């Protein structure tokens, strides 16, 4: 599995929004600064996430973006698939592609290995929620270093 910059930035932005869940909208500039994401790129990603139903937005001086669902109802797998597609490591085990049959499929010893890798990765990202990610992050934050809560 390869996570692109798009997938990385989207998951970082979603974590920031999850860390601030139920605290009102966050301006794009605040998310970008805290997560080290270029503002212009973040604007595009947030629109994709909004169109997919992960985010809501509010216009105006106190506007910004916020999660449309609680952090425990959004998985890392959903975000990654939206941004990067399938987490399959190779085309022959990717259930989302309509690929031609591999010419060496009948004698290949690797296909079952790649399928196993795909299943393990998918299982991890599909069971890991934004809430789980926030809890992991809070374990790393020194006391008093931030005022996050979920």
Image (cartoon, helix red, strand yellow):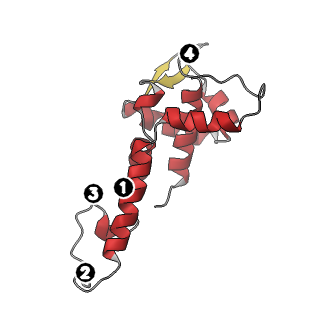
Q: Is residue 74 above or below residue 93?
A: above
Of 32 and 74, nearer the camera is 74
Where the C terminus falls, by quadrant?
top right
Q: Dot 4: what SS?
A: loop
Q: Dot 3: what SS?
A: loop
Residue at numbered disc 1: 86
The percent coordinates of residue 119 (x first, y second) are 35, 58
The percent coordinates of residue 105 (x first, y second) are 25, 80
User: In front of the other: label 3 or label 2?
Assistant: 2
User: Mark 1 and mark 4 in contact (Cβ < 8 Å)?
Assistant: no
**Residue at point 40%, 58% (across, down):** 120
Q: Earlier in the sequence, mark 1 or mark 2?
A: 1
Q: Earlier in the sequence, mark 2 or mark 4?
A: 4
Q: Which mark is residue 24?
A: 4
Residue at numbered disc 3: 96
User: Mark 2 and mark 3 in contact (Cβ < 8 Å)?
Assistant: no
Residue at numbered disc 2: 105
Instruction: Name the side, left or right, on which 137 lies relative to 141.
Output: left
Circle 4 Cα neighbour tier, 10 Å, few/some/many (<14 / 14–19 / ≥20) = some
Q: Which mark is residue 51?
A: none
């Amino acid at each position: 599995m390869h996570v692109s910059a798009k997938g990385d930035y989207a998951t970082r932005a979603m974590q920031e929004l999850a860390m601030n869940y139920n605290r009102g909208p966050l301006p794009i500039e605040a998310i970008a600064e805290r997560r080290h994401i270029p503002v212009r790129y973040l604007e595009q990603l947030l629109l994709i996430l909004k169109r997919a139903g992960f985010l809501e937005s509010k216009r105006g001086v106190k506007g910004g973006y916020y999660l449309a669902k609680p952090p425990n109802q959004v998985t890392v797998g959903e975000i990654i698939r939206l941004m990067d597609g399938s987490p399959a490591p190779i085309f022959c085990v990717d259930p989302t592609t309509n690929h031609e049959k591999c010419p060496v499929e009948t004698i290949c010893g690797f296909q079952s290995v790649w399928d196993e890798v795909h299943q393990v990765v998918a299982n991890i990202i599909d069971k890991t929620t934004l809430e789980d990610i926030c809890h992991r992050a809070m374990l790393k934050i020194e006391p008093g270093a931030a005022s996050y809560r979920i």
